[in-house]
Image (cartoon, grey):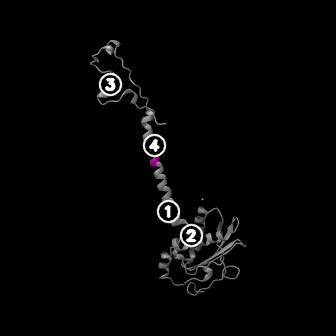
Amino acid sequence: TPPGATHPTPSSPGKSCYTTRRDMTPPTLRESPRLQLPTQLPTAARVHSHGGFPPHQNLSHEEAVAPMLHKSILATVGIFGIVAASSYWVWKTQYDEQRPINMALLNKHMETFLPKYRREECLVRVDITDSGTWSEALKDRIFRNLMHFVSEARPQLGPYSYLLNPATGQMFVQFADDCPNRFEHMRDWARRYARRYDVPRFTVSTDIITPGPNTLDHRDEDAWVE
């Protein structure tokens, strides 16, 4: 969990028909003890003897296209398989909320971080609508989604504190750095969340929020000057 982060609330091939050429030799030759065959082969035999194809092996257009179509279908299926596998890998490594949180950028920012803002200058209220039915899984999804956003996409916000209150339909987030831009950062987070999930919907308030028991009352001298 990022420094200062708190979490108080817990998808038929062509058929070939072979015909036998009947012996067309005249009866007189068949009865002769010394059979004499014609010196000129029938047309079909001549074609075959020179390496051609007998008439019955001539392929129709459909028979000639079928192998190519089959290969094309296999290639298309293979491409879709590769794309699907790649998409799953990207989703699992880049978008799945349960993936490990990459703290490298936030840790890098913390190497030179010094507190310079008061808590009320960094506190944001987010109003929640269309939440559907609250569950622990939904609360955890929101919390981890925000953790990924700050740690990996907005490390300049530094350490932060968080409170989700489903009863009042409000969420409070208190950053420690780049506080003048806190509203725009949270709007960007809300837009990203809405592109992935149907519920809840978040509206970022630009009201100045006073830290306290009715909002968020988290103190840390290493994060805020007051």
Vertical placement of residue 168 versus 38, above or below: below
Q: Secondary structure at mark 1?
A: helix
Earlier residue among tags 2 and 1: 1
Q: Secondary structure at mark 2?
A: loop
Q: Nearer the viewer, residue 39 or 167?
A: 39
Residue drawn at (45%, 41%) of the image:
69
Q: Nearer the viewer, mark 3 or mark 2?
A: 3
Q: Residues within 10 Å of mark 2 (few under 14, many from 20)?
A: few
Q: Which residues are magenta?
A: 70-75
Q: Position of residue 24 (x, y in %)?
A: 36, 17
Q: Which residue is mark 1?
A: 89
Earlier residue among tags 1 and 4: 4
Q: Is residue 204 visible?
A: no
Residue 45, labelled with which disc? 3
Q: Which residue is mark 4?
A: 70
Q: Position of residue 200 (x, y in %)?
A: 66, 66
Q: Label 1 near label 2: C-beta < 8 Å?
A: no
Q: Secondary structure at mark 3?
A: helix
Distance Cα–Cα, label 1 vs label 4? 29 Å
